[in-house]
Image: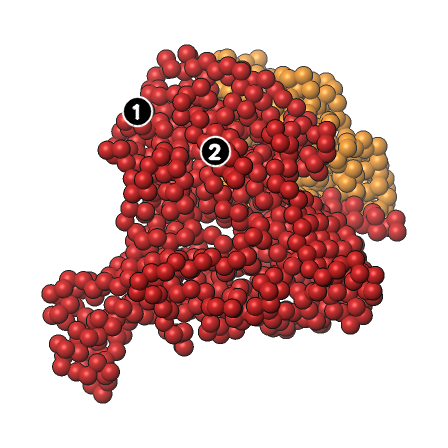
Chain colours: A red, B orange
């Protein structure tokens, strides 16, 4: 309920490192690895594709009931009266709660200014807001009963256009108005003075659409109570975050709340927080003394369960003749939805390029639509869409190559963090080696084509500004037969986290990957890990696992040295055996009597703090070639190179897959996806997968190359990995937009670039 | 959630027609459109009459006159890949192949494809729109970027079928069986404009069933194609499309059909473009003139003027394709 402020630059301060005894110390960096980095197939791949993986929706507990939620059909309305008489009498119905029930008052959207709403709020501020819920014996009975609940609404004036919502006469969502947090300005230097002295100045306004996350697995929970303790299965990226919020909602000690999230079908930031469906399941379970499943619908994910907020961004940028950037002035407006949350990020303007004079003004405004949530690099793809297009326009004005202009302005320090140096920065290498692989120079000179099919290429750069939290604990157990259990609270949201856990344990402990079992994402039985979001899962948890594995290895070697009467310095581990230097004999771990007697060796690992005075962040540069059909407005991405400095590649397969997914998402952002709300009613028009157009395999370029750039970072953490999920999508749409401009000689400022955009851009070019 | 309905699978056409005549009954074959409508509560059903036991309605047969009979239950995949259709009626094969996704084409039938309900987001969504018996067409003043630029009236939806314009370009006709016997309706008279009746898309009466499509023999020298413009590479309806069929003598066009998809509440035949083509050879200049003609007299709404350019583009692409092939 209390959302982490994932959008603001107030997250700049690296999270303080808690002190544990003994103090956590990272191992020295790996040199060459054998298992880590290899193309190891996912250890749960067969289960995922074969249908045996149990997702939250598959959970069926004995006696379990099913919940259905009644949603407000209006964009803005007040509930006047609810009649549950008919619903109550329907077959299978076991419990009904409405906004008149005591539990309805559970506070929701907790902020510094207090709670903005409640679990079932009679004041409905968007279409889809929850007003009542039913638990029944079957899903169909629950749905029928929910439809039989009669709700009378007073429909209120609404606003869904976020630019209109800032106006003084706009309908107000909350008593304090539509802008609960003041406009924030971040600046350094003097932009006005710099503009006056610059050789080239460009000013443009860009718009980006609202995009729901549309994870393949929709949100949902199963809840049951056991002797006053709450157990919840939830499709979530962070079991510990959900546990904490549930403990607040039900006023329970943390130890009385168990949250489990095993197989997950995607989150993208939309499953970082506690959902109302979870609390509704828990309330209904308490009423009935039965387990209750509350599964949401696809429409819910489109309307209510988070989105990437629409942005309007005006950027003024200036450079000198030699290409050095002298000023960036950006004004960002973002649509939070019906409840406050930051809806913009100025980070890229402030830190991607060296620039002495920067001003960023950020405003988030409320509208009568579902609340925004973190979405794969919150605010960054929107900012990259604007910044990276303006950089291209500056290059054009200066007569410079877009890559040359970018290379002219690569920082080696974080200007936002008082000039602290990066542990490594591969931004230059991403641009240079990516350009080389792409064949930038020759492609850029090639004419767009005389026919109606125009080819063009474009580039965009990006970075991700969060180094992740350092606090995680991992426990590793080596059993008597040489098999291994890794225990971590981290969720594997589909990115392959479990497989990388197994690889790291195998690498460190000399055991085969197949002998490592991962026990994960269960607050009752696994160790604390932060939520799997913000590209931090690998770099937070794997150093802790290395430490745990090293402790077990040290203990194992000591036991072996004693038992085998060998000098410990001559012993090493490999493929589940103890190997002795100068001796061909191998002793399987399982043959060690001392291990058998102990049954298990246990190592506890924590992560060391971030390096002092240094900043560890990932970078990227993407290159796209497009073909634009000027007759039909169709844009086809035909060729793509994604150069990623995310430090060490932990698994060659999951790395490429993560980048492929990020680029696909960027194609959706740049070309096809757009939530459409009806301006007359504020209700969702694009409510299905036909009308909300995620890209298909046919929209992805056949010629796609992922180019990992590994700067061999020995300082960032003991794995050398810097995080990949977010930076793999940040520059994608902007690279495509720049390629489109190169192809047709006209720029499209608003995403997505649809056939209509191309027709209009060509028409306005014709008028010039 | 689907409504509660009974399900029956007749084995004879007579039985199917009898069952369909009962109130609340709806025909179901591939179900790719019907189940979505029921699930989204666009309309409801008390009884689903499965047509899948009527094997005689499946498959493609060559007629004695050189034409073709396509059973209504023939899947889009079968239509798209059938050798005779591919050889003699390319526009239909291309249109069937351009519809939906491979899974939907394997399941969906040609009869269902021409009878499918509108894809307008107001019609499919939680809006009491005119076509569903409400008072207004929300698209007129609302989100109409995908809507009609021709033939709009009380309703400005666009007909979603790809195969219907192709069949119209081929001068196909539809065979219907109902309680009062059989009848044959030319494709050009099969669809209903909203100005005539905005609550129905076709002339199919309650209890009636599309049993087959009849294609006349093509002209001795015939070329045809379908060009579909869409927002993404697959699994999408046409923003604009052009089905073009030409009868040739040497290089000279003797007959022409130009039918647009995605721009009107019915497949939209543009006779002005056809007239422009007849009597000439395909040249860049002719293609340009025909494309201009096809887009003339459009009446775009607030958000879809771009479709006028797309009509020109789709027709030009289709004609260029035929010229290159010829």
Asked if badges 2 and 1 are on one and the same chain, I answer yes
- Is residue A581 placed above or below A49 in the rendered structure? below
In percent of the image, x 27 and y 49: which residue is there? A525
Instruction: Give the image location of residue B166, x and y in percent.
Output: 67, 37
- Nearer to me, B21 or A736: A736
- Is residue B157 placed above or below B221 in the rendered structure? above
Q: Residue furthest bottom?
A: A582
Q: Earlier in the sequence, mark 2 or mark 1?
A: 2
Instruction: Classify residue A543 by image quadrant.
Output: bottom left
Binning the other alpha carbons within 10 Å of mark 1 as few (below 14), some (14 to 19) or many (20 upward) gives some
Instruction: Classify residue A406 by image quadrant.
Output: bottom right
Binning the other alpha carbons within 10 Å of mark 2 as few (below 14), some (14 to 19) or many (20 upward) gives many
The subunit letter for the residue under badge 1 reads: A
Instruction: Indicate the secondary structure of the residue bearing disc 1.
Output: helix
In percent of the image, x 39 and y 65: which residue is there? A608
Q: Which residue is mark 2?
A: A108
Instruction: Indicate the secondary structure of the residue bearing disc 2.
Output: strand
- Nearer to me, A731 or A276: A276
* A718 to the left or right of A467: left
* A18 to the left or right of B20: left
Q: Nearer the viewer, mark 2 or mark 1?
A: 2
* A293 to the left or right of B294: left
Instruction: Give the image location of residue A72, x and y in percent.
Output: 53, 24
The subunit letter for the residue under badge 2 reads: A
Q: Is residue A682 visible?
A: no
Mark identifier at residue A241:
none
Q: Which residue is mark 1?
A: A288
Q: Is residue A287 visible?
A: yes
In percent of the image, x 81 and y 64: which residue is there? A198
Instruction: Give the image location of residue A107, x and y in percent.
Output: 46, 31
Instruction: Give the image location of residue A73, x and y in percent.
Output: 56, 24
- Nearer to me, A670 or B22: A670
């Amino acid at each position: 309920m209390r959302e982490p402020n994932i959008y603001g630059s107030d997250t700049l301060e690296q999270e303080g490192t808690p002190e544990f005894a003994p103090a956590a110390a990272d191992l020295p960096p790996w040199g060459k690895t054998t298992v880590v980095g290899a193309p190891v197939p996912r250890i749960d791949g067969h289960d995922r594709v074969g249908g045996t993986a149990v997702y939250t929706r598959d959970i069926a507990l004995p006696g379990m009931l099913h919940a259905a939620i009644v949603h407000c059909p209006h964009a803005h309305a007040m509930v006047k009266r609810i009649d549950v008489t008919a619903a109550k009498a329907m077959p299978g119905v076991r419990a009904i709660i409405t906004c008149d029930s005591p539990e309805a008052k559970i506070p929701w959207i907790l902020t510094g200014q207090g709670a903005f709403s409640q679990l079932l709020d009679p004041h409905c501020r968007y279409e889809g807001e929850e007003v009542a819920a039913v638990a029944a014996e079957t899903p169909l009975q629950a749905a029928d009963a929910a439809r039989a609940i009669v709700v009378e609404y007073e429909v209120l004036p609404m606003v869904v256009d976020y630019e209109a919502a800032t106006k003084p006469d706009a309908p107000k969502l909350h008593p304090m108005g539509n802008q609960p947090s003041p406009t924030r300005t971040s600046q350094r230097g003097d932009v006005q003075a710099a503009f006056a002295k610059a050789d080239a100045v460009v000013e443009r306004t860009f718009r980006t659409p609202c995009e729901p996350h549309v994870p393949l697995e929709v949100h949902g929970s199963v809840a049951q109570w056991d002797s006053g303790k709450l157990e919840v299965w939830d499709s979530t990226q962070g079991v510990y975050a959900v546990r904490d919020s549930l403990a607040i909602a039900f006023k329970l000690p943390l130890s009385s709340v168990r949250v489990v999230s095993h197989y997950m079908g995607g989150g993208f930031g939309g499953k970082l927080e506690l959902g109302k469906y979870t609390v509704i399941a828990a309330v209904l379970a308490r009423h009935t003394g039965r387990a209750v499943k509350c599964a949401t619908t696809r429409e819910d994910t489109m309307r209510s369960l988070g989105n990437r907020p629409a942005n309007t961004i005006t950027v003024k940028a200036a450079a000198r003749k030699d290409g050095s950037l002298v000023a960036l002035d950006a004004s960002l407006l973002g649509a939070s939805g019906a409840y406050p949350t930051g809806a913009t990020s100025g980070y890229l303007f402030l830190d991607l390029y060296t620039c002495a004079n920067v001003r960023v003004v950020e405003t988030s405004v409320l509208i009568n639509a579902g609340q925004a949530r973190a979405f794969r690099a919150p605010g960054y793809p929107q900012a990259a869409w604007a910044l990276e297009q303006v950089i291209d326009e500056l290059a054009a004005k200066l007569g410079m190559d877009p890559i040359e202009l970018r290379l002219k302005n690569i920082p080696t320090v974080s200007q936002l963090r008082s000039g602290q140096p990066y542990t490594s920065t591969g931004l230059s290498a991403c641009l240079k080696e990516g350009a080389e692989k792409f064949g930038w120079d020759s492609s850029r000179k090639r004419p767009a084509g005389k026919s109606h099919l125009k080819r063009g290429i474009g580039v965009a750069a990006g970075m991700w500004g969060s180094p992740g939290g350092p606090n995680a604990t991992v426990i590793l157990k080596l059993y008597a037969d040489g098999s291994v259990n890794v225990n971590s609270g981290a969720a594997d949201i589909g990115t392959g986290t479990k497989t990388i856990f197994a690889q790291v344990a195998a690498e460190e402990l000399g055991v085969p990957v197949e002998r490592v079992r991962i026990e994960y994402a269960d607050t009752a039985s696994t160790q604390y890990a932060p939520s799997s979001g913000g590209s931090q899962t690998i770099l937070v948890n794997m150093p802790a696992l290395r430490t745990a594995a090293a402790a077990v290895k040290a203990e194992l070697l000591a036991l072996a040295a004693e038992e085998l009467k060998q000098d410990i310095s001559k012993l090493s581990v490999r493929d589940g055996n103890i190997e002795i230097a100068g001796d061909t004999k191998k002793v399987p771990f399982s043959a060690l009597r001392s291990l058998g007697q102990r049954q298990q060796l246990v190592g506890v690992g924590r992560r060391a703090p971030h390096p002092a005075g240094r900043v560890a962040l990932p970078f990227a540069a993407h290159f796209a070639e497009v073909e634009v059909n000027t007759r039909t407005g169709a844009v086809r991405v035909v060729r793509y190179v994604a150069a990623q400095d995310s430090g060490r590649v932990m698994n060659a397969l999951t790395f490429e897959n993560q980048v492929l997914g990020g680029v696909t998402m960027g194609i959706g952002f740049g070309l096809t996806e757009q939530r459409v709300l009806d301006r007359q009613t504020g209700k969702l028009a694009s409510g299905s997968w036909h009308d909300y157009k995620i890209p298909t395999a046919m929209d992805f370029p056949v010629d796609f190359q992922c180019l990992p750039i590994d700067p061999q970072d020995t300082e960032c953490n003991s794995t050398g990995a810097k995080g990949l999920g977010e930076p793999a999508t940040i520059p994608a749409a902007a690279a495509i937009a720049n390629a489109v401009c190169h192809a047709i000689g006209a720029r499209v400022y608003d995403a997505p670039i649809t056939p209509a955009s191309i027709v209009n851009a060509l028409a306005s070019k014709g008028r010039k | 959630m689907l409504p509660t309905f009974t399900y029956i699978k007749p084995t004879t056409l007579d039985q199917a027609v009898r069952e369909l005549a009962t109130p609340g009954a709806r025909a179901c074959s591939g179900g790719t459109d019907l189940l979505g409508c029921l699930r989204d509560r666009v309309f409801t059903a008390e009884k689903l009459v499965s047509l899948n036991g009527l094997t005689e309605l499946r498959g493609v047969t060559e007629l004695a006159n050189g034409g073709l009979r396509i059973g209504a239950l023939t899947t889009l995949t079968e239509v798209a890949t059938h050798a005779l259709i591919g050889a003699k009626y390319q526009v239909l094969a291309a249109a069937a192949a351009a519809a939906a996704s491979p899974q939907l084409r394997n399941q969906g039938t040609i009869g269902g494809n021409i009878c499918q309900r509108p894809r307008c987001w107001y019609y499919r969504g939680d809006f009491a729109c005119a076509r569903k018996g409400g008072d207004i067409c929300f698209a007129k003043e609302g989100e109409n970027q995908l809507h009609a630029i021709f033939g709009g009236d009380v309703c400005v939806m666009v007909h979603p079928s790809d195969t219907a314009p192709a069949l119209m370009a081929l001068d196909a006709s539809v065979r219907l069986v109902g309680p009062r016997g059989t009848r044959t309706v030319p494709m050009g008279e099969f669809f209903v404009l909203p100005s005539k009746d905005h609550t129905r898309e076709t002339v199919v009466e309650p209890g009636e069933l599309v049993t087959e499509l009849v294609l006349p023999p093509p002209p001795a020298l015939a070329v045809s194609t379908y060009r579909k413009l869409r927002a993404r590479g697959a699994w999408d309806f046409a923003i604009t499309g052009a089905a073009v069929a030409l009868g040739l003598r040497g290089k000279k066009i003797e007959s022409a059909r130009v039918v647009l998809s995605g721009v009107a509440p019915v497949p939209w035949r543009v006779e002005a473009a056809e007239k422009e083509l007849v009597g000439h050879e395909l040249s860049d200049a002719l293609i340009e003139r025909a494309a201009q003609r096809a887009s003339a007299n459009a009446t775009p709404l607030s958000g879809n003027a771009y479709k006028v350019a797309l009509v020109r583009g789709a027709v030009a692409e289709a004609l260029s394709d035929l010229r290159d092939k010829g």
